[in-house]
Amino acid sequence: MSYQDLYKESIDNPQNFWKKQAQQLNWYTFPKKILKANDKGSFDWFLDGELNMSYLCIDKHVNEGYGNQVAIYYDSPVSGRKEQITYQKLLEEVSKLAGGLISLGLKKGDTAIIYMPMIPQAIYAMLACARIGVTHSVVFGGFAPHELAIRIDDCEPKLIITASNGIEIERIIPYKPFVDQAIELAKYKPEKVVVYDRKLGVTYTTNKRDFDYENLVKNAQATPPVKLNANHPLYILYTSGTTGTPKGIVRDTGGYATALKFSMKNVYAVNEGDVYWAASDVGWVVGHSYIVYGPLLNRNSTVLFEGKPIKTPDAGTFWRVIQDYAVNVMFTAPTAIRAIKKEDSEGELIKKYDLSSLKYQFLAGERCDVATLRWTEQKLKVPVIDHWWQTESGWPMLANMVGVEPLPVKPGSASFPVCGYDIKIINEQGKECKPKQEGYVLVKLPLPPGCLLDIWNNTERFKAGYLEKFPGYYFSGDGGYFDEDGYLYITGRVDDVINVAGHRLSTAEMEEIVASHPHIAECAVFGVHCDIKGQKPMGLAVLKSGISNDVQKLSEEVVQMVRNEIGAVASFKDVLVVNRLPKTRSGKILRKLLRNIADKTEYAIPSTIDDVAIIEEIKSIYISNNIGIHKNQLT
Ligand code: COA
Ligand code: AMP
């Protein structure tokens, strides 16, 4: 069937279409209610169906005779460890850990935080929670204790599962001490902490609430999966929004399982038994969907890589992993390719490895510039597929659905709407834009299965942020346009969310931290272009009157504050002191203008600006600080 026909079917008759896809899964009770409007203004899928994600990812395959197939290839250049975990071994590890969690008092309906590096125990922990109906919230290791504390207070976990430490190239990241600090900072106090000791010679203090992971598993009873309703929350994943407070995206079980299974075959062209590698982190949505749940649902061998595209040990490490595990399809962020390209521009390291297993290279997480796409195509000699999605959707919204019908790639475009997503480009007045006219990227409701159910503890924010801006549509927060051939081009966020090395961050959150420095009167934080990371945050600060600081010292203090509060992942390294900030006559800071001047993108001077002269002032500050002297590759 052609992409056009399949897509049309999914939009014309979503109930039939997704019922058919749901039949690809083994349910305890197949749903009678396929799609139902709910009182939040959105829709629920498969409400009365019953299933278990852990069963579908593990037991089903073992029962069908695939216990000896490798489920996880763990490869950790930073610790020098490698392990091949079969589906049988995965079953033992997960069912025993699930038993251990039950022995600690966890039960269906509880929440647990998982704060772990890229080790198999992180995957075991996710699947063990899913097995017993505990909603997990994985927190990315690059976030500092303060960010972890915010999440603890929001989702009130009964228990935290962590590891002694992580490794960033050569630096030890003290996960367990960070958990202790976070619990100290949080108002809500989780009762128990399970610690996996990586035995890397790093010591940590133990508290009364701590339990050793290995002991727990050794003494536990293997536990079967429990039946869960399709809309049982599998996980909460926090992401950055336009305010300083992250939002907990809530994911269901049945819709998500259906959508992921569909996507493995139809978007990624992956068959059961294939090797699939998403070089991301379990702390991000890509990790949830395409390191853990998607490939395991589809009985693939998934690669769990604890390293970086460069320096672990060199820019050939990705190609070594593809060769060693005969990876069929790989997924990474354009920033990783740019980092590799910078170190090995001629692709000499690629030639050292046999990449004949690779069929497709997928890219997402940020806009893919044409130069990066072309370089990857030329060097890997396979189709390179840019595709677009977000934490909220949980799976691709725009893609070249190569599993259905590979279509020509147009660099700069993430291609076409994926089945189930009725995407429209709408202008400020709510009218549909013509081809080549840029507008808001919206999805006509209902969203397909797998997308967010709600925001944890904040249905009002869910409705206001996503559903009420354009009634009848889901608001993605991105801008874009269709061309005459129906290819969609994402142009970037229309809000203050930025994307740094494929990591989504809130400038509002950074701004709150910078503004809390006792000598700073006001500030603006915004994203500027970065050749490797796509964007990086930059701050401009105005000092309080009467304060004349050592600017270097102040800037170091502010950078450290952001690092302490958000974490190293914020990559906040540039802050300049200015006399004033450009504002509208009503006092709103013109952040977009500040960004555009730095990026040397074309901009119109807003008619509402209170003083035009400030533009020249800002330009000269940028020039004297070497800001914005790059060539903007993204045009
Ligand atoms: N735990 C602790 N710290 C972490 C971390 C983790 N899991 N991940 C990143 N950090 C730290 C880094 O060590 C770095 O610290 P530093 O400022 O002290 O050097 C900081 O956070 C910023 O990290 P990052 O943005 O990753 O920059 P980098 O310079 O270390 O690496 C890339 C640059 C491009 C190689 C890297 O960002 C990368 O591999 N990106 C791919 C991103 C990706 O897969 N995104 C997922 C979406 S698909
Ligand atoms: P996250 O929720 O962290 O996955 O970030 C989602 C955001 O990243 C989207 O809203 C986009 O702004 C951006 N993004 C992801 N993939 C792409 C892509 N292929 N092209 C352009 N932007 C992308």
Image (tube, rainbow, N blue to C red):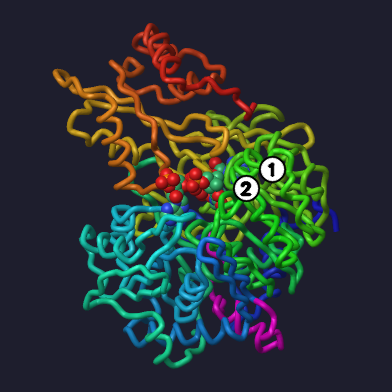
| Location of the C terminus (image quadrant) | top right
Residue ranking furthest to the left? 546
- Where in the figure is residue 481, as x and y percent of width and height? 66, 33
- Of residue 456 and residue 515, the one placed in the foreground of this image is 515
Are the residues tagged 1 and 2 within 8 Å (C-beta)?
Answer: yes
Queried whether the magenta region covers residue 506, the answer comes back as no
For image coordinates 53% across by 73% down, the residue present is: 230
- For disc 1, the marked residue is 414
The amino acid type of the residue labelled 2 equals Ala
Magenta region: which residues? 43-70
Q: Residues within 10 Å of mark 1 (few under 14, many from 20)?
A: many
Q: Secondary structure under badge 2?
A: loop
- Where in the figure is residue 78, as x and y percent of width and height? 52, 61
Q: Is mark 1 within 8 Å of ligand 2?
A: yes
- Where in the figure is residue 167, as x and y percent of width and height? 45, 60
- For disc 2, the marked residue is 364
Mark sitting earlier along the chain (1/2):
2
